[in-house]
Amino acid sequence: MLDFKPETTQIRSWSPLLAHLMSTSPQSGGMRNIHVPLEHEPEVTTEGFAIGYLYSPVSLNLVHPENARAVLAAACLLGGMDELCNYAYEISRQSISVDNISEWLEFVEAIPTPSDGSSTPIEPQHLAPRRTAVFGPYAERLKNDILHFLVVTLPNGLNMNGLSSPMTPQGDSQPADAGRDTLLQVFSRVPFDLFKAAVESSTFQIGSDQSRFKFAKDAIEVRKRGIARGQPEETVVLAFGASSMGGSAVHVTRKTRKRHLWKVSS
């Protein structure tokens, strides 16, 4: 809960949320205390809210990669600040890196994904985390940015400093190079729907369909270590000739493991 006393009524013109709170909060001694329940919005930090509340052209100078997502969440919550939203979103998008990808993957995992029947959800959608709801359309935009990072930016970046890269994978009998191993470790933590979209993407920068299939197979082996017992099993198949017809030659699926049946003889 964040409590504060607004010093001006000008906030009515740019924040629908604060305008509503000002019109409904009781006065005490001629002053009006505003209570904002931030405990229900974990993405909104006190710093992010303060930057949004004090919104002015100068506020843009206070936004940096470490607080950009919190500022975006606060600006979306307060409303009426498209410029700040767009600026904070752009800083957030540019901040995605291999150093903080784990944090961004947690963010993506909190975005509910409508089931289209092609995969088995790990949990009912009504139980999916809702911490990202405050971002509105920016949540999906950031999810797409993270997908682009996974399939294009990260594979290309792992080819720097003279390292062999996933774009030139080595044979089955040879050890994986540093870049490919890093990519495997990242993909071992990617939520299934994003993992499927990345592997099946024609823009995934790791070489031929066979290379993509081999990478997906290796990644699934690593992912199995983190999948709880009883959770759906992930598999990958290679459909020869599919890419020449405009479709993906590599397909990732997930199915519920069959329970072992024990036969009891009398």
Image (cartoon, helix red, strand yellow):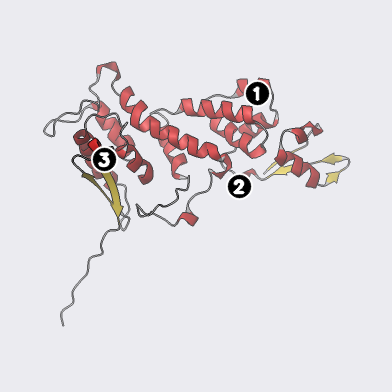
Measure how far apart labels 2 and 1 are at the Cα level.
Answer: 25 Å
Residue, disc 2: 40
Looking at the image, is mark 2 or mark 3 nearer the viewer?
A: 3
Residue extending farthest to the right is 30
- Side of 141 relative to 149 (left or right): right
Q: Please state which amino acid type lies under the numbered disc 3.
A: Ala
Disc 2 residue crowd, few under 14, some 14–19, many 20+, Cα 10 Å: few
Q: Please state which amino acid type lies under the numbered disc 2.
A: His
The answer to whether one can see residue 89 in this image is: yes
Measure how far apart labels 2 and 3 are at the Cα level.
Answer: 35 Å
Circle 2 SS class: helix
Disc 1 residue crowd, few under 14, some 14–19, many 20+, Cα 10 Å: some
The answer to whether one can see residue 66 in this image is: no
Residue, disc 1: 59
247 or 46: nearer the viewer: 247
Residue drawn at point x = 20 percent, y = 71 percent: 262
Q: Earlier in the sequence, mark 2 or mark 1?
A: 2
Quarter-of-image position of residue 13: top right
Measure how far apart labels 3 and 1 are at the Cα level.
Answer: 43 Å
Residue drawn at point x = 84 percent, y = 44 percent: 27
Q: Look at the image and tell me in which quarter the N terminus lies.
A: top right
Q: Please state which amino acid type lies under the numbered disc 1.
A: Ser
Classify 250 as above or below 118.
above
Residue, disc 3: 219
163 or 168: nearer the viewer: 168
